[in-house]
Image: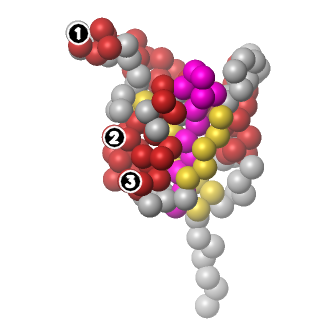
Amino acid sequence: MQSVPSVHVVLVIANETLTSQAVHDAITGHDNKTRFFLVAPALNTRLRHWTSDQDRARMAAEERLERCTATFASLGIQVDGRIGDADPIQAISDALALFPADELIIATHPERRSNWLAHRLVDRARASFGLPITHIVAAEQGDLAFDRAA
């Protein structure tokens, strides 16, 4: 009896960094037996959150997610995605409930610019989810892999 090759499932959580070269390289660096689920949290300002104005944040996250999934699909990479909760830990938890993963990739801005790192997201995710986690840092400027294709 021939065994069916197992699919490795990777959950990627990223906001503005979703379209970075760092995320592009992390995903394209896996083999073709890997399936990806991208989560783009709909991050918002405190004022807009308090006034329940989520539209801009959701639209921005959706636009990044659509560009990303279309690009990877055109490369033959198995990728799905969704907009996630503004709280990245909650977004990860929600995604894992729908899409059990073998690995988690967290993409952030550099430390001096990253709210997620200031709130210890990577450490908190390691403590909460029990998955291998890869933390990638997008370059400060000019790191938008998906903006090159026009």
Q: Which mark is residue 32?
A: none
Q: Which residue is nearer to you in this view: 97 or 106?
A: 106
Q: Which residue is mark 3?
A: 128
Q: Residue at x 65, y 34 (%)?
A: 137
Quadrant placement of the C terminus: top right
Dot 3 falls on a residue whose secondary structure is: helix
Residue 64's x, y, as percent?
55, 24
Mark 3 vs mark 2, CA separation in Å: 11 Å
Q: Amino acid at mark 1?
A: Thr
Q: Nearer the viewer, mark 3 or mark 1?
A: 3
- Residue 112, compared with residue 9, is above or below; it is above
Q: Which mark is residue 51?
A: 1
Dot 2 falls on a residue whose secondary structure is: helix
Q: Amino acid at mark 2?
A: Gln
Q: Which segment is the magenta one?
A: 102-114
Horizontal placement of 71 versus 149: left or right?
left
Q: Which mark is residue 90?
A: 2
Q: Neighbour class for label 1 at 10 Å: few (<14), some, many (≥20)?
A: few
> From this viewpoint, is residue 83 visible?
no
Horizontal placement of 94 versus 115: left or right?
left
Mark 3 vs mark 1, CA separation in Å: 30 Å
Quadrant placement of the N terminus: bottom right
